[in-house]
Amino acid sequence: MAFPQVDAAITQAFTAAFSHNVTMPSTVVKGDLLLVLISVNDNRNIGKPVGWEELWHLNFGTFGRGGAYAKVAIGDEASTTVDFPTGLVTEAASQVYRISAWPGDLATGLYPKNDLVSDSGTDPNPGLNNPSIGTLNWLAIAACNYADDDATLDGIPTDYTDSLSALSGTGTDESASVGSARREVNAASENPGAFTLSASQQWISSSYLIREAFVPVLTDVETTEEFRDGATAITIAGHVFEAVQGTGKVEISDNAVYASGTKVAQTVTSWSDTAIDITAVLGALAPGPLYMWVTNDNADINAVVFPVTVHRKIAFALSASANITASGENTTVQLTAPATKTTGDFGGGRIMDDENPGDAVDLAADEYREDEWSIEATTDAVDSQQYEFRVLIGGFVSEVISKIPKWTIASGPTQHNQTIAGNLPAQSGAIVATHGFPISIGGTLGALTGAIANRKTGFVAAAGTLGSLAGVLVNRKTGFVAAAGTLGALTGTVAHAGSTFKRSMAGTLGAFSGTHATVRTAFISIAGTLGAFTGAVSHTRTTLVSIAGTLGAFTADLASIGVIGKADRVYRHWMNTNKGLRRIIRRNK
């Protein structure tokens, strides 16, 4: 394990005043230890700032008072000032340490000496600091607070380095000072030894042992600790993750106690001792405030609870519209005016398909506005889930919301398999597909006796038998590319905007006994028999390009402005009514 690290150490001196605004380091990372040592030239109390823990606060001699204060950084302290006020105008001196690679918890990571030594003279000595938790890697900081006559710090304990000294005030009985030094030590306890002052002073000495991090410590997740389900490259910063993942894992849960929560494992994409990348997985957990846990390869779990906020996947997104100008445009009155107002009070608004938030609209007193967005549900919208929408004004929710727009996502369409090696049973209910029916059917497809609506390819390959299509068939693209076996009769209405039976039909196609309407190619090739057309047929493009077998009779009205058959006979630009064929009938020579 590594020793805790001092990332910043700064000193500051204050002239006589009630307030003593101690400046924090210019960089502070969430989870850092902030340690403030302060001396004042008076026995009055030093005020404890909000959010800080007082380690000690004592008088020393006639002229001085000192204290030590600690805080686990939340990450917003950089370059800020923290006031340590006194009850009387007095000089003060301070030091601030910023420390990383520690456990991240004051109770288990910071051990100040409990029985402080106070005296006068030139040799402040903190004495023995024994946490009684065994031999560990420690960052040891020894300190002395002194006041009286502007003496200087001339020497630090043996084996200590990085001497710091802050002196405020000059002259007899008018100074306040604090000095410190540090070292790394592997031991069960630490006894620093004495400092050396340039002249006799009233003093109090202290020491602090900061423990090495012994379990994973999380310091940051995406800066804001907020991310969305399914988001990739989510970076978790910290330490003691171990260099290799091994059995390590990242989880989120709904409980601040690891053992008590419902946990969902995250997808780890990279792992190092100080950083982990994941793809977020919300799983069965409800979105909102949750907790993140890292377990390293040693089965150590972060001891400090790390809250995060996880949102659902993006269910709605702006949708570009050809009817809306880029960057939005002004709206006109569309809705009923709010209560107590008329449409004459309408002050404008914006309609947008590529901006959110929208553009500013200046309203006069008592005017109202209307705003519109073009949005659509994404594939991550949850079926049967009701979504509520709200409009924010300057980032804030309106104080009065009289109506809440709601959108419920209906259950999605049936998505059939892309490959079926065996048989597909008969489909007797309504079938709606936004993509293909099966691309490959190795066996038999039972009869489709219910309504069928399809927006893309129907059947690309059916190696066996396809049962009758006995219900309404509505298809917007290719119907069947290849049917090697038999296709049963189409006994219901067929409406088609693309190719119905395309490329190859090696077997038999049953009779068309219902209404058939298509605006694209119907059959390019049929090697077998096509049954009779006993219902009305309406077609605006090529119907049959090649029939090697038998074409059944057309016994009902047939209308076409394209080519019907192209094999032994070609029928061009013709129309068949109850009175018989008209226009041109041409035989191939």
Image: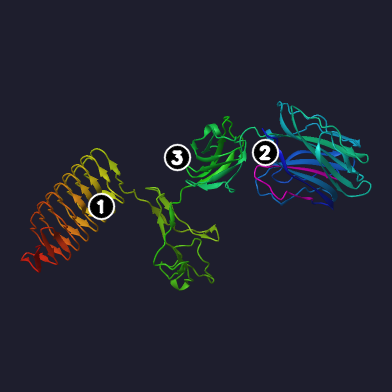
- Visible in this render: residue 41? no
Task: Please name the amino acid that badge 3 sits on.
Answer: Ala
Q: Residue at x 50, y 43 (%)?
A: 279
At mark 2, the secondary structure is loop
Task: Report the side of 523 relative to 24 (left or right).
Answer: left
Mark 1 to mark 3 CA distance (whole Å): 33 Å
Q: Could you say where residue 341 lies in the image, as x and y percent from the top left?
A: 46, 69
* Nearer mark to the viewer, of 2 and 3: 2
Q: Residue at x 83, y 30 (%)?
A: 127
Mark 2 vs 3, N-terminal side: 2
At mark 3, the secondary structure is loop
Mark 2 to mark 3 CA distance (whole Å): 34 Å
Residue placed under numbered mark 2 in the picture: 101
The residues colored magenta run 20-41
Task: Please name the amino acid that badge 1 sits on.
Answer: Ala
Residue placed under numbered mark 1 in the picture: 453
Task: Report the side of 210 relative to 526 (left or right).
Answer: right
Q: Could you say where residue 551 lies in the image, as x and y percent from the top left?
A: 10, 54
Residue sitting nearer the eye, 338 or 275: 275
Within the image, what quadrant is residue 244 found in? top right
Within the image, what quadrant is residue 205 found in? top right
> Residue lying farthest front?
589
Label 3 packing within 10 angstroms: few (<14), some (14-19), many (20+): few
Task: Please name the amino acid that badge 2 sits on.
Answer: Ala
> Residue lying farthest bottom?
344
Residue sitting nearer the eye, 534 or 542: 542
Q: Could you say where residue 118 lies in the image, as x and y percent from the top left?
A: 86, 35
Residue placed under numbered mark 3 in the picture: 284
Mark 1 vs 2, N-terminal side: 2
Q: Could you say where residue 85 lies in the image, as x and y percent from the top left?
A: 79, 49
Task: Report the side of 405 relative to 41 (left or right).
Answer: left
